[in-house]
Image (cartoon, helix red, strand yellow):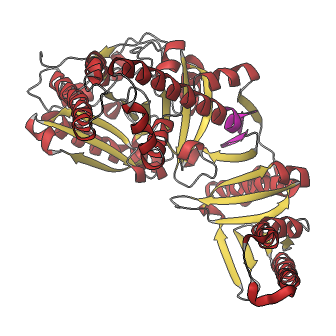
Amino acid sequence: MPRSLSPLSVPYRVLQRGGGLAVGLAFVLSGGVNLPFLGPAGPLVVLAVAGVAAVALVGYETAYVRRFSYELTADTLDIDSGVLSRRSREIPLRRIQNVDISRNVIQRLLGIAVVSFETAGGGETEAQLRYVTFEEAKRLQTELARLKRSASTDAEGSAADAADAGSVEPESTELFALDRGELAILGALSVDLRVPGVLFLLVSTLGSTVVSTYLSAVPGAALVVVAGVLFVAVAAVSWIVGAAAAIVEYYDFKLVRSGDELQYERGLLQRYDGSIPFDKIQTLTIADNPLKRHFGYATLYIETAGYTPGGSSGSRGSEAAIPLAEREHVLDLVEELEPVGDVDFERPPRRARRRYLVRSLLAVGALTGVLYAARALLSTPFPWWPPLLLLPIAVLYAHATWRHRGRWLGDHHVVTRNGVLRRRTKIVPYYRIQTIIDSRSVFQRRLDLATVTVDTAGSLSLGGQDAAAVDVSGATADGLRDELETRLSRAVDAYRAGRAGIGIEDEYAHGQNGATSEDGGDSAANTGADPGANTGEGPVKDTDGGDAGNARTSSSDEDA
């Protein structure tokens, strides 16, 4: 039977849409707008118009809520909506990937919620119910999961088995809960790297004249001290903003395994309650930064093929399965979701490190040149040489970029790692690969380097955040691309056979790629080596940069 939205949707929608009208009315009545053509009766006319608009708004929202209906059938989600123009939609249940529930503070007080239905590959939410009671939202989430389980069982067995499977509630197991102490640590280790750019933009657009006037009055030697103080201030603001955002976003975080999906709850001001089906997981990402690596913590993200409302920090299509935990705990959950085994990363050839060094030195040189030009053009006394103090940091950063970069092919997964300040270790099952891209820039071709990108159906791939083996040798890239295509074909065959890429025949698991490389150990054969020969003590436990674990990281390539 079709159902309707909550009656409380009417006053909430009126207040939500009428807020701007109320602010504008107050501005006009306070004298902010001169209306001489209305004469002495101007305020009364404005109030009358506002009253008509308010009545029209209430009438429209009442009609919208009353004419909105939805029904969850055995095969589809049917939605009828519209006041002046009617719209009827039938969304097949097999297309629905996530059912996410969100509630802000006011909605929680009213007991209503927004229910979002996400579909695979969608750039935006497929359908939303604004607003139903929270109890109805949970019923829809549970009922849709039951119907999908029933349909899946029906496709594999008898109708009786499907009915039994649909009527039995799956067992729920709590995988992770973020306590107050861990939440505090998460805030302390979170830094918003976007803040320096925003502050620089504000200063350059709003206060450049004031800043230049102030700097012109400061002695040259004192400018170094001023620059240091500003650096510390920007770092402090970045840390405060990052800490506040992390605490608000992941307050009271819980992750539960229920049947064939993960369910999560999180949020302080905006509460999210969503689901992540196992069969929609595209990529697992272990993320950290220097602070997290130093203290042995990490974050686990799960990337799906759809659009995730309220995704963390602009990461649409990606949801934090563990916002912050000890690295060993994160690796244990990785093993439960995608058994990867021991990982033995291979770094790029050492000539790639020279490329990173040149790039870092050029950045320092460019900054120095900008200050020198500004000093000459603006006739200000501030020194041009402070950026040269960053030269040792540039050298260390170039080496760290090379050291933290690597790739590995396992029995059933390709694993890549990139980044220093925001390091990302990406785990992709072979059967999830959509496209294998071999790209070589002008600068890479001069050093015979290439980047092999593993494209998936995940939404983050649209922003260039796919797993990538960056700056491998040209010969290695050729062999790596061919090996990935071979393993993809075999993994897809195994997946279609119902094994989901796990338990594939031995000749696939132990396959070797005979391609060779001028870099000696940096060869395609090594990328396809039997991972069972590794001697590490856990999955993805490379310890560069202070991580927990003892697995090896190989770097057998040509000498510098």
Please indicate whether residue 107 sits to the left or right of residue 293 in the image: right
Q: Quadrant of the C terminus?
A: top left
Looking at the picture, how far across and down is residue 75, in whole percent?
69, 68
Query: Residue 50 sits in which quadrant?
Result: bottom right
- Residue 493 in sight from this viewpoint: no
Q: Tell me the residue at 10%/33% (across/down).
A: 447
The answer to if 6 sits in the magenta stretch is no
Looking at the picture, how far across and down is residue 217, in whole percent?
40, 29
Relative vertical location of residue 445 with respect to residue 173 in this rendering, above or below: below
Looking at the picture, how far across and down is residue 395, in whole percent?
25, 18
Nearest the camera: 372 or 331? 372
Query: Residue 342 sits in which quadrant?
Result: top left
Q: Tell me the residue at 42%/27% (across/down).
A: 421
Query: Residue 302 sits in which quadrant?
Result: top right
Please indicate whether residue 437 sits to the left or right of residue 523 in the image: right
The answer to if 260 sits in the magenta stretch is yes
Nearest the camera: 308 or 107? 107
The magenta-colored residue range is 247-266
Please indicate whether residue 213 sits to the left or right of residue 518 in the image: right
Residue at the limit of the structure toward the front, as seen here: 217
Please indicate whether residue 72 sits to the left or right of residue 469 in the image: right
Looking at the picture, how far across and down is residue 311, in whole percent?
60, 46
Nearest the camera: 531 or 450? 450
